[in-house]
């Protein structure tokens, strides 16, 4: 079983599992559209994205002369796949040091994602350093240092309450001195509606840009997949405040709300780069739209 199939089992067995039941050998009628709409909304696609899918299906019915619900099954896959885009490679090449800034609310899986991303990059031959820019919580610093030990990458940290900008400044200088080519910066888990914390995030970005003018090269927003449509609301605010370049969606193995991927990508217009599909070191996987959609259906 593929990691996608395993990691998305709860979404597949939950509301998406009802999709197959909708597409029996019956005539397409008004009830068909109502049932599909209700199922997709309950599967956390959101109202706007669900309407886009319905329009795709209805156009296929008109253009291809479909009359039976079982004929819609394959078309639904095509409609869902059309909502997604292949992620581009991370912008971490062709320079001495690339800086990745990680943002998101408390409890979204930020620090764990940083550790897994560091592991992934180190395994591919990169020289990685971590910066403990979340100085509000001693536990956050400790957790990042434990991940650094586990992965085998250095961590630059200061005492709790220290200026995050100063930590990031020290980390960039240390990364350059030690010949690291990727620096991943943790930030405090901040609520998307907290103005002061958002302003601090802007300050951290300013410190980075002062030392490396075109940095940060990536700003990755970590969203908790178990929160469904609430993740979309968070994403909108962060995208505005932090100039987010990509998304990491975590904890999808523990929820039936995997459909939120479609609305997050289509409404934020920011690519999903990685999915968290388990607790293991290798369970942060590069997003693959075809594998993702196929894994939502029982017949693959």
Image: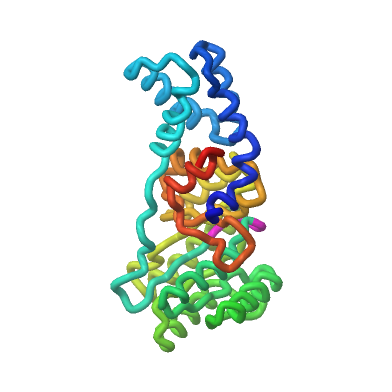
Residue 105, magenta (yes or no): yes
At x 36%, y 68%, the residue is 92
Residue 22, magenta (yes or no): no
Direction bottom: furthest residue: 177
Main SS type for the magenta part? loop
At x 42%, y 32%, the residue is 79
At x 41%, y 62%, the residue is 218
Of residues 9 and 107, the one nearer the viewer is 9
Q: Residue 245: percent from the left, percent from the top?
A: 41, 55
The magenta-colored residue range is 103-107
Residue 101 visible in the current orientation = yes
Q: Is residue 269 left or right of residue 26?
A: left
Q: Is residue 86 left or right of residue 154?
A: left
Q: Residue 217: percent from the left, percent from the top?
A: 38, 65
At x 39%, y 37%, the residue is 82
Of residues 279 and 233, the one nearer the viewer is 279
Q: Residue 89: percent from the left, percent from the top?
A: 36, 60
Q: Residue 38: percent from the left, percent from the top?
A: 59, 24
Image position of 16 with respect to 135: above or below = above
């Amino acid at each position: 079983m593929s990691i996608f199939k395993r990691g998305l089992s709860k979404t597949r067995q939950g509301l998406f599992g009802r999709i197959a039941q909708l597409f029996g050998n019956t005539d397409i009628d008004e009830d068909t559209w109502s049932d599909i709409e209700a199922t997709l909304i309950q599967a956390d696609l959101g109202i706007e994205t669900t309407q886009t899918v319905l329009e795709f299906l209805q156009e296929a019915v008109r253009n291809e002369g479909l009359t039976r619900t079982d004929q819609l099954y394959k078309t639904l896959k095509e409609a869902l796949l059309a909502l997604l885009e292949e992620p581009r490679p991370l912008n971490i090449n062709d320079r001495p040091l690339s800086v990745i800034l990680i943002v998101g609310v408390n409890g979204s899986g930020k620090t764990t994602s940083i550790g897994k991303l560091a592991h992934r990059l180190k395994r591919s031959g990169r020289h990685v350093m971590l910066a403990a820019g979340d100085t509000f919580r001693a536990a956050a610093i400790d957790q990042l240092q434990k991940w650094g030990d586990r992965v085998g990458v250095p961590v630059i940290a200061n005492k709790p309450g220290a200026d995050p900008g100063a930590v990031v400044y020290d980390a960039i200088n240390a990364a350059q001195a030690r010949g690291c080519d990727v620096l991943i910066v943790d930030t405090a888990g901040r609520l998307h509606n907290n103005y002061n914390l958002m302003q601090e995030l802007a300050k951290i970005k300013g410190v980075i840009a002062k030392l490396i003018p075109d940095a940060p090269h990536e700003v990755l927003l970590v969203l908790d997949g178990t929160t469904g449509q609430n993740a979309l609301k968070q994403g909108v605010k962060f995208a505005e405040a932090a100039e987010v370049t990509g998304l990491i969606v975590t904890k999808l193995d523990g929820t039936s709300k995997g459909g939120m991927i479609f609305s997050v990508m289509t409404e934020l217009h920011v690519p999903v780069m990685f999915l968290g599909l388990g607790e293991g070191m290798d369970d942060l996987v590069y997003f693959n739209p075809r594998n993702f959609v196929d894994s939502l259906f029982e017949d693959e």
